[in-house]
Image (cartoon, rainbow, N blue to C red):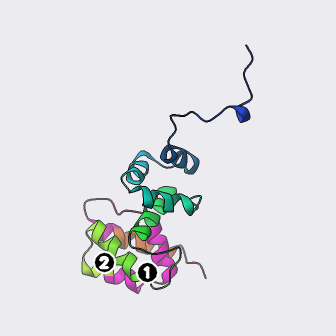
């Protein structure tokens, strides 16, 4: 039996736009589920921004969705404060941890937020540990 080369075989019809985007970007089940929970408009905006670049595409997707929901465009100046407040609220962070994050250089803040949700029993301690680790690794100039 003759089989067409892979390049000429159509994508399975069962692959929805979300599934295709998740597969192309290497998203895990949790990130894919988060994308599915969004409105069609938000999903379209996520797709419109293209491929998820960075070491952690799941975290990049989470940040992209958060920014879109907050009404920000790509790299909108002045959006950092809102993003930090949103991150703090989503992760149950206290004022001291938030203040420490706000006092860090912008590149450090970005790297910390890019890692995605803070997990563990004590999110404040996890955030502060993440901050120390990122700062010890040096920042972009």
Is 136 covered by the magenta stretch?
no
Main SS, magenta residues: helix
The residue closer to the viewer here, 27 or 10, is 10
The residue positioned 43% from the left and 63% from the top of the image is 65
In magenta, the rendered stretch is 99-126
Disc on the earlier residue, 2 or 1: 1
Is 120 covered by the magenta stretch?
yes
Q: What x and y, as percent, mark residue 6?
A: 70, 32
Q: Which residue is mark 1?
A: 80
Q: What x and y, as percent, mark residue 37?
A: 36, 52
Q: What x and y, as percent, mark residue 87?
A: 35, 71
Q: Could you tell me which secondary element the residue under label 1 belongs to?
A: helix
Q: Is residue 74 above or below residue 15?
A: below
The disc at residue 102 is none
Q: Is residue 54 visible?
A: no
Q: Is residue 87 visible?
A: yes
The residue positioned 47% from the left and 65% from the top of the image is 64
Q: Could you tell me which secondary element the residue under label 2 belongs to?
A: helix
Which quarter of the figure has residue 51?
bottom right
Q: What x and y, as percent, mark residue 115?
A: 45, 64
Q: Nearer the viewer, mark 2 or mark 1?
A: 1
The disc at residue 97 is 2
Residue closest to the far front? 41
The residue closer to the viewer here, 41 or 80, is 41
Q: Residues within 10 Å of mark 2 (few under 14, many from 20)?
A: some
């Amino acid at each position: 039996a003759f089989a067409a080369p892979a390049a000429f075989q159509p994508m399975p019809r069962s692959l929805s736009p979300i599934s295709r985007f998740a597969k192309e970007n290497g998203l895990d089940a949790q990130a894919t589920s988060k994308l599915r929970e969004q409105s069609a408009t938000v999903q379209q905006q996520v797709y419109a921004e293209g491929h998820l670049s960075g070491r952690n595409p799941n975290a990049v997707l989470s940040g992209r969705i958060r920014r879109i929901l907050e009404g920000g465009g790509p790299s909108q100046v002045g959006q950092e404060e809102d993003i930090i407040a949103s991150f703090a609220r989503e992760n149950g962070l206290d004022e001291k941890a938030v203040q420490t994050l706000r006092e860090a250089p912008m590149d450090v803040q970005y790297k910390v937020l890019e890692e995605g949700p803070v997990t563990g029993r004590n999110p404040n301690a996890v955030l502060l540990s993440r901050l120390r680790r990122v700062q010890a690794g040096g920042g972009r100039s």
